[in-house]
Image (tube, coloured by chain):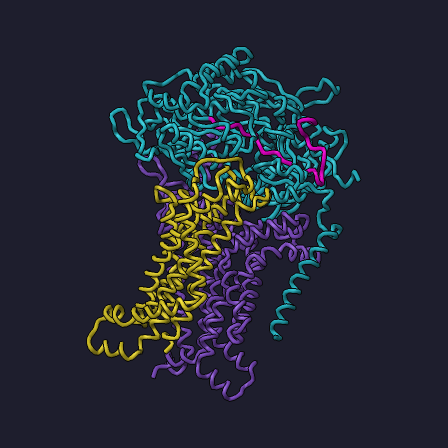
Amino acid sequence: MKRLNCLKLFFTGVLLCGLFSCQNSRKGSAEVDFPREKTLYLAGFQWGDPNTFNPLSDWPAFPVGGNFNLMYEPLMVYNTLNGEMEPLLASSYEKTDDVISVMMDPRAKWSDGKMVTASDVKFTYEIGKQYPSAPTSFVWDYVATVTVDTVTDTTEEGRSIEKVNFIINKEKRNNPLVVMDFLQAVRIVPKHYFTSLLDSLNGEFSELQKLKIDKDPVVSGPYNLLTYSGEKIVLKRRNDYWGNAALYGNRLPKPEYVIHPIYKSNDAFSISLQQGNLDVSSTFIPRIWMKQKEGVSTWYKKEPYFVPAAITMLVVNTTRYPLSDSKFRQAMAAAVSYKDIRELAFSQYSPPLQPGLVMPFGVEEKYFAVDDVQKYGITYDIEKAKKLLAESGVKSVFGSDGKLSHMENSKGEKLPTLFIKSPAGWSDWEAMVRIAVQGMREAGIDVREGFLDASLYWQAMPNGDFDLLMHGPSVSVTPSQPWSRFEAVMSSRNWKAVGEKMNENQGRYNNPDSKDYNAAVDSLLRLIPTITDDDQRREAYRALNNIFMQDQPTIPLVYRPEQFYEFSTKKWTNFPTEENPYAPPQCLCFGVGTKSLWEIKSTAEQE
Amino acid sequence: MKILINLLKTPAFVVGIGLFVLTLLMAYVFPVFYPVDTITRVGMPYMGPSAQHWLGTNHLGIDMVSLLVKGLRASLYVGLLAGIIATIVGTLLGIYAGYTGGLQDDIINLITNLFIVIPQMVLLILISSSVKEGRSLALIAFIIGATGWTWSARAVRAQSSSLKSRDHISLAKINGTGTFGIVVKHILPYILSYVFMVFIMQTASGILSEAAISMIGLGPYDSVSLGTILNEAMRNEALTDGAWWAFIPAAILVTITAFSLYVLNNSMEGVFNPRLRK
Amino acid sequence: MLKRYPTLRYILTRAGWYLVTFMVAVTINFYLPRLGTSNPVDIIMAKVGAGLDTEAAKEKEEAYLKEFGLVELDKSGEIIRNESGKPVRTPTWKQFRNYVLMVMKGDLGTSFLNYPKKVGDMIKEAVPWTLAIQIPTIVLGWIIGNVLGALAAYRRGVFDKIFMPFSLFISAVPYFAVGMILVYLFAIVWNIFPAVGGYAGGLIPTFSLSFFSSVIYHYVLPFFSVFLILAGGQAIGMRSMCIYELGTDYIKYAKWLGIKENKILFYMFRNAMLPQLTGLALSLGLMVGGALITEMIFSYPGLGMAVLTAIQGNDYPLIQGCTLLITVCVLVANFTVDIMIGFLDPRVRAAYGGK
């Protein structure tokens, strides 16, 4: 019996240990390294181990790269609520057909005290011309040269400020819209810091890209990297940030620390949000209304909860029969219950879907033409789907049990089953695919779920190795929307046969070498970025959207937000919302959303 | 026959077989009385249990009881198939290694160790990426069986190695019976009951392995199993939304199935072992 | 000559076999991930290629191929091309040679997907956590399971009648299901234990009381999700081993001689434990990859998740690093047990001593 007593002792010991530490961690907030009332926790941007904080590498960890403005800053920021560009390192911009110019803010400083100048901008862009592996290498199809003028400030007399001119590359892409995107997408890096590093490495750029730049990096933004591990990234407020005086009336951002915890499963986000251990999240959390009682909130209090910004769609491989037939594609589009997708798979996080590629709200509402959509658009209608299928010449064969067996072409030959490729484990997409498959099969279209590992999905997409493929193209809200979406879906500028890589129009719509080539699509896509007249632009989008609806190169399924902006009001309040829209629905590190850092309030302070 | 009567006298055996038959009934007979439908969405996501849908709905509004029935079927299928594969491979290699000993024994030991150090995940992901249909239930069963035989090989080896020095085997050797003949005629019959117990254990561990593999997100793409039900519940916020019906019944079903097999195995050990230890 | 030292001879033979196993395992673990159709650079390009023109994308792709040592280079460091201008891929055997040379220098290479992070650093950061959650659970589960199993076998009676079915039931529960139910009850319904992370978010790992108490607090649920099942499984195995030992002549003889109960129990325990040791060694060896589901459910720090993403993303250096670690652990653990058996088990001495 002695042994049993030992055991009892052991279990009591373990429990006591647990309870003791429970007591300790509950009350002992004084012993924490980062006091809760001074720390903002946000998550959803970094998934694996942070690899590098080098802004010149291709996929650095949060908050370097992406649209994050905490450490490195862009010239301007794009307000997704009203479509305006707001000042950051540059105070204003001018735009003509040939050149886009920005005026540098002379007050901007790096964290080592040096000025942020036009030469930093020039360096950031030109490093991409010199080294093809630099992240800015892609700008040179759009920008011909970057020049700098010095002009005298008219408001503050005698002060000279720098003007950076981005000359549009007319030879190559001639696309001012995308150059506007660059103003808010390219983060400026300190020239003096990186040139001296590069010199010490004998000019080996690939060696420079291997540096992690994680010790006291020279940044211009309001926060800097303090420490990081596989569990979290910790940023500390820079009290000498130039913008505090220049842009925010001498105020400091409220959180002294911004911490990005790295979670390994989806439900960790919602558990942490509900328990007040996470303040802002950007992951898909289904049924957000179930969490509202725990203080979890979103932009809208009711559905659709989020602001729609992009379209999740089924990309169709138009090189394979019967998918090459637009009637067949329309039949598929008519067989999907968009309402079920929205309500069951997507937790009603989307307004009802309208046909076409133009969204009927927000900045692009002005391009939405109701009449066209009613005339050409396909909506959910199983009977219509069956009719369209019959018109396409494809015949469905049903088994004796009444279930769909397969499809036949007009010659009576059996057609192979079509598969929808979608990454396994992406739960909202999985649900959408299941609903789409069920509807299409009901209409007599032989389609099946084709879930596969994410790595194979990423490989199948550019190579065109699919029948149908789930995809959310062009998710960022930028000045170039909705053009970027059309370009990503319809452009045959880089058309390549299946097996070679295409980074847009992966469905190979509109082959320029075929007899059915519709030249209007590409010429409209080339034209729209250069149009300056509003009416003309509206007409051009109308024409393009009508072609889309008639040809149905892809099947839009649901609108999705740019990011799933969720926040908990347990520790911080006054987040931007529909009623209090002082900043767009973006995580507090992202784009214009960054300015919310100066406005939120700690609940500890209010008591 | 006598063994069977002996077994039926053991209460644990009766409990084990009873539970196992119960799971079989639930998987194959119960659907006669209950409309099993894992495609139609009958309600909103995570509806609680009701008279119509005894265990509510899952995150897509599909009837949970139907999913459990289908899932149980898939899990039993994976378990049995994996169990058969693992038992055959393990028994053959084990007997051979145990009977011959020496170099062959060492080489088989090397192979056994290799299968322990090569992660199952690598094989799973690799093979499923090269098979066109992706990860089917049968493929998963095959991989579980093909990697899970190691311990049964070791166990069978120990048994057959202890038989090696028995008189009747020496006698058979003198009479000129070949290795194969000795293994089939003189070793296998003696350890047959043991092999059957190994098979039961391999089936149980096959069911648990499938659940674990599906839980990681490497489960079958083409069917519902108890593991995928747990995985989907976890990924679709059943925990935070308090939808206990989406994961607790599946967890209980896995446990009961494995438990019934464990009890069976254990009760047989009590009946068979005295013979083996003579 | 070694015949005079049977134990030494036994150990050397075992060591030789483990060395061969090790080399074969490393080779297989190198070639296996490369048999698949997917290519790590394609996966990276899908991540960074959006918006790039075909030409620019091709240049970037080649830069990565070169950096990862997947293409042949000439003396000046330029990529060798075939007639159609495509880069010549390095044959796998050459990659293998380079890999072996690198590992001999103690370099595990650079991860592809976490470029430019070193595989060695990733392992170094994650392994302490994996060991910290696994070792206490495995060792305690093993000890307590074995003690209880031996006790049940020795006492039989009511204790055994209740204990046995209970252990069987416990060991049939999938441990991740226990994890999910623990999270649901203790973290969500009652909110008394944390379910996310290895320590409170507001802390950085230091040698302080607040950090350690936070670690223990966060450890409660992961510990119990595995511990009971493990102890149950061990207890069953130990119980049958002990029943077997109890039936042997030496115990009967000892009882007849009237030797103290505790002493008999000790002998029985020692002899029954030998086979159980192998199980312990195996679980200790496999623990590096084994904590994956616990990691996923509790967002616990560790290596399991990194291994999974590495395999899915064809991050060869990381896969190789992790499988190397697993191989070494399993083989060393097995070897240690073999040595212990060599010293403890007289039969082995007899077998290798010759006659």
Placement of A306 over or under B197, stated as above or below: above
Q: Which chain is purple?
A: C
Q: Residue at x 23, y 69 (%)?
A: B181
Q: Is residue B110 left or right of residue A301?
A: left
Q: Which chain is cyan?
A: A
Where residue C128 sits: x, y (%)?
A: 57, 58
**Number of callouts:** 0
Q: What is the quadrant of residue B258 in the picture? A: bottom left
Where residue C114 sits: x, y (%)?
A: 51, 45
Q: Is residue C341 left or right of residue A564?
A: left
Stretch in magenta: A556-580
Q: Which one is nearer the viewer's eye here, A182 or C312? A: C312
Where residue A78 sits: x, y (%)?
A: 61, 25
Q: Is residue B136 left or right of residue A198?
A: left
- Colour that chain B carries in the picture: yellow
Q: Which one is nearer the viewer's eye here, C252 or B235? A: C252
